[in-house]
Every structure is written in C-alpha cells, then in structure tokens.
Image: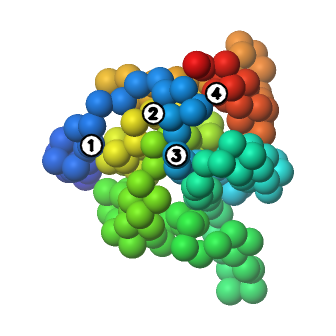
Amino acid sequence: MLDFLKTYFRKRSLRKNSSTKPTGILPLGEIRSYVAIIDAEEGTFDSCKTAIMNFFRSNDIKGCVFFQDFRKIGSEDRLITSIQTTITKKDLDWLGRPSRYKLNVLEEQAPDLFISLVKNPDFAIEYMARTSKARFKIGRKQMDGNLFDLVISDPAGKNISQLESFTAIKSYLTKIR
C-alpha cells in the first residue's frame, strides 16, 4: 500500500513540476552553461569531475558538477565533496525528491545542458532531470517518455565508468554542428 501511494505521489509531483521547455540536441557552440551529476560512490568520480570541468572550461562554458552520494556517513567520516552540490540521503524527502535548497542551487545555474552520468538513476535524478529547464539532456539510461535527448549506455556485456561515458559524450558534443 505504501509503495502504491509513493508511486502515485511521485507521478503527481512529476506531472506538476516537470519542465515544459522543449529539448533537443544542441551544437556545442549554442551551449552557454551546464550541470553534470556524477555518482560520488564510483571510483573514477574525482577524475571524472576534473575531466568535465576542464572540457567545459576549454570551451568557455560555465557550469557546475553535482554529486550523488548515498553512502552511510558516520560521525567520524567526512563528506569529500561540496555540501552545496552534493545530494545525500538526508537531502531527500519521503518521495525521494531532493530538497528545495539543492533544487534551487541547480536552478540558479540555468543550464542549457543537463548531464547525468549516474549509471542507475533513481527518482532523485529523474526528478532533477525532468524539472530542469535545460534545452539538451544527456543520460546513461533512458527513462520513460524519452527524457534524455542523447543516451550513452554501456556496450553489451561491458561495464564502463562515468569517466569513460563522459569521454564518449565529449566526442559526440564536439561532432554535433
């Protein structure tokens, strides 16, 4: 019963808050800002963050990297990413939506490009992607309603890292004219 209610309210929330802005593939020259979300639990997250920031900086595109970090952090542990741009389990409401504060930080970026490098996106990632007003959305796994304009999925039988996925995204972005 609880799962049914959660699903009902999630769908209702998405219907109410999803962006109605049309999306599509944009050439790199038309992208002025980006937001990328990476999984802080994957080993390559730090090198992936650096690669993302360097690529966009070299193309004079401003933006921000967000982190999804759902690890259980004890009192002795420290968060290794910025608290403003890290989504933890504590930041989610009972439906699985990120806090209003985190969504506002994302909105302030006013991104033209939204990238999710999270291999198995949960409701929090779906919610951020659907409510984002970005004109071009890229992900690693397609969601209902063809949410992402470009999907870079793992090749059959291969498990690739976020960094390898971003390398593939970079090659596509530089080819789109």
Q: Residue at x 71, y 31 (%)?
A: 170
Q: CA distance from mark 2 to mark 3?
A: 11 Å
- Rendered image coloring scheme: rainbow
| Quadrant of the rendered image containing residue 77 | bottom right
In the image, is 138 to the left or to the right of 7?
A: right
Q: Which residue is mark 2?
A: 136
| Quadrant of the rendered image containing residue 94 | bottom left
The amino acid at mark 1 is Ser
Q: CA distance from mark 3 to mark 1?
A: 19 Å
Q: Is 68 or 171 nearer to us in this picture?
A: 171
* Residue furthest out toward the top: 156
Q: Is 156 or 4 nearer to us in this picture?
A: 156
Disc 3 vs disc 1: which is toward the camera?
Answer: 3
Q: Which residue is mark 3?
A: 32
Residues at marks 2 and 4 touching, judged by CB atoms closer than 8 Å? no
Q: What element does badge 1 sit on?
A: loop
